[in-house]
Amino acid sequence: MRWIRRFWPAPLGINGKERLRFIVGAMLGIFLTAMLSRWWVGGGHAHGPWMLGALGASAVLVFGMPSSPLAQPWPVLGGSTLSALVGAVCAALVPDPALAGALAVGLAIALMVPLRCLHPPGGSMALYVVLTASDGLHLAAFPVLFNVLVLLLAGVVYNSLTGRSYPHPQQSPARTASDKSAFAASDVDAALAHYNQVLDVSRADLEGLLYLAGRAAFQRTLGEVRCADIMSRPPFAVEAGVSLKQAWALMRAQKIKALPVVDGRRRVAGIVTVADFMRLANLDVHEGLGQRLRALVMGRGGQPGTVGEIMSHPVQVARVDQHAMDLVPLFSHGGHHHIPIVDHQQCLVGVITQTDLVRTLAVVVQGRDEEEGGGPGAVRQSAPPPGEGSPTAPT
């Protein structure tokens, strides 16, 4: 049954508007080509064909799949004309029409592939010339070349007017050094080489589709994780008037490296970190560091005595409903290690550290969330281990 189901085609995946655009374009292209070709031969009274049936297949590609490599101007023009010439040569050299037809189609493909003008209707052009036993060289000029040129002109105009790029770029633009993604251009080339089949999609479009698919997967797994899902709460915090001794003792007791500084309404006014203590203790001079740090927290030697005197301000904060991945640039390039999280009233409700974010990335990338129930909810339900960023009680 699985083998039989392969014969059932998948839906094209286009909406009604695109379907109408496709139908109208093909009709207009064929009508314009027919009218001009018939006028060219004097109203259809000339002997011999003035339009070929294979042009209908070309119209399907040009108007229905304008981004396809098989529908670009050079494949349509070169593939059709070249195949007609090949058919003429085979018809002249091989008396048996069956053998000549098979040879014409095979040779046409053999030439279209290296010349980058593979166009499926080209095979029918070659076979038509052989079977009609007509002057193939004359047919290659008219009606083949004339028909194709008119159809291509109509395709360029119609596709442009209806919002489709034609000719469609077949190569991806060069990436800059700062343009990072989950895969590189060389990865796409390696995948195509491994696939080793003709694809009816350009390499540039394939790379773009892979990028969009990767971004959608990222959005599904990480993009919906909010700061509320991974922040440590309730957070430790101190007010600006708290002594350095009390703040230092709290940080050591709870094994945390930063304390948000809040006012009476729990609004973030700054942040004090271990680095602030080390900076004031003159970390560059190693001799007697312990004594100088002790003197700082004990308030001796003319050193600052309260948290408000050494805190860093203003401080970078994030909203509780903000996407957690918005914090990646702050941690990676902004030099931040702790981000206080505030609610809609700008009151402190949590803290996110680099450890919290890295742990979230590890959980999602390794697929533990699917094993525990799937989706961002698994991150929300898992409590981080004790240490930096673990949930704590307020002072």
Image: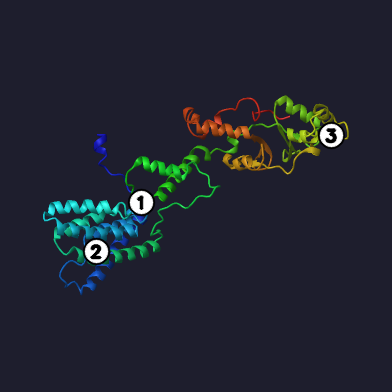
Q: Nearer the viewer, residue 191 or 367?
A: 191
Q: Nearer the viewer, residue 355 or 1?
A: 355
Q: Colour mode?
A: rainbow
- Crowding around mark 1 (Cα neighbors within 10 Å: few <14, some 14 to 19, many 20+) is few
Q: CA distance from mark 1 to mark 2?
A: 31 Å
Q: Residue 208 location, x and y as percent?
A: 44, 48
Q: CA distance from mark 3 to mark 1?
A: 69 Å
- Confirm whether residue 260 shows in the render: yes
Q: CA distance from mark 2 to mark 3?
A: 91 Å
In the image, residue 65 sits, relative to residue 306, either above or below, namely: below
Q: Residue 52 location, x and y as percent?
A: 21, 62
Residue kind at label 1, given as amino acid type: Ile
- Confirm whether residue 321 shows in the render: no
Numbered disc 2: secondary structure: helix
Residue kind at label 2, given as amino acid type: Val
In this rendering, the label closer to the viewer, 3 or 1: 3
User: Is mark 2 in CB contact (under 8 Å) with mark 3?
Assistant: no
Which image quadrant: the N terminus? top left
Numbered disc 1: secondary structure: loop
Mark 2 or 3 closer to N-term? 2
Q: Quadrant of residue 4?
A: top left
Mark 3 or 1 closer to N-term? 1
Numbered disc 3: secondary structure: loop
Q: Quadrant of residue 305?
A: top right
Q: Which residue is mark 2?
A: 144
Residue 14: assigned label: 1
Q: Which residue is mark 3?
A: 305
Q: Quadrant of residue 295?
A: top right
